[in-house]
Amino acid sequence: MPSYSIDAPEVVALPVANTDATFPVRRVYCIGRNYAAHAVEMGHDPDREPPFFFQKNPDNLDPSGEFPYPPKSSDVHHEVEMAVMLKSGGNNIAIADALEHVFGYALSLDMTRRDLQGEQKKMGRPWEIGKAFERSAPVGVVHPVADVGHLSEGRIELKVNNEVRQEGDLNQMIWKVPEMISYLSDYFTLAAGDVILSGTPAGVGPVQKGDIMEMSVQGLGSVKVPVT
């Protein structure tokens, strides 16, 4: 056993459906503006824009089932997404081979301190203060490909207090899952434990303490997440 100078951080591990096993998280990549309607609502033309990614931290992923409203913000937005969990990786992965590296899929939220993100955008600075805060990515259980197959179409939805706020279809992604994996692998060495948040449909908006968010993706069920 190695000798560490401090206590080693705990491995972030997410529950896997219908098993006692967990999925250990290595890195979290998030694609921006990957649904055309959402790109438009954020003021961008999606037609010829190349993909771009930002990152969250592994321990931002939170399977606890609740979302604590974060400090230093009065404008926190919901963004429902499908998470893609990798079981292997590498560099320069061909699009045709990309799905071979997927372990499974999960429901997730990319919660955003929109006011802080907006301030960073105006100054041309990174987004982490708006995106990578504690428990900023509520996540459901991981569904292995062996159980649910590969999800390329199906309804994705977010309700707040039983009112539909976001709705779309996975087939509306500008950059599909194999393309995201291939693109990332050209710039990073992907590996087992990597997670990709695959983008959000239109309708992002604010939540308040006491709200109940409910995220769903066809084939992955639904998860309720109260704002505490």
Image (tube, grey):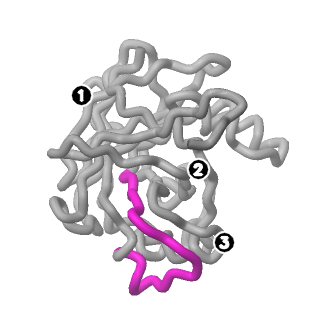
Q: Position of residue 130 (x, y in %)?
A: 65, 35
Q: CA distance from mark 3 to mark 2?
A: 26 Å
The residue singled out by tag 1 in the image is 162
Residue under the image location 49 percent in, 28 percent down: 206
Judge whether residue 214 can be spotted in this image: yes
The residue lying toward the viewer, choosing from 225 and 77, is 225
- Compare marks 1 and 2 and give the one earlier in the sequence: 2
The residue lying toward the viewer, choosing from 186 and 3, is 3
Q: Secondary structure at mark 2?
A: loop
Q: What residue type is disc 1 on?
A: Asn
> Which span of residues is magenta-colored?
82-99
Numbered label tally: 3
The residue lying furthest to the right in this view is: 123
- Compare marks 1 and 3 and give the one earlier in the sequence: 1
The residue lying toward the viewer, choosing from 81 and 47, is 81
Q: CA distance from mark 1 to mark 3?
A: 40 Å
Q: What residue type is disc 3 on?
A: Tyr
Q: Secondary structure at mark 3?
A: helix
- Compare marks 3 and 2 and give the one earlier in the sequence: 2
Q: Quadrant of the N terminus?
A: top right
Q: Is residue 89 magenta?
A: yes
Q: Position of residue 25 (x, y in %)?
A: 47, 48
Q: Is residue 79 magenta?
A: no
Tell me the tag on residue 187: 3
Residue under the image location 35 percent in, 38 percent down: 165
Q: Quadrant of the C terminus?
A: top left
* Location of residue 13 (image quadrant): top left
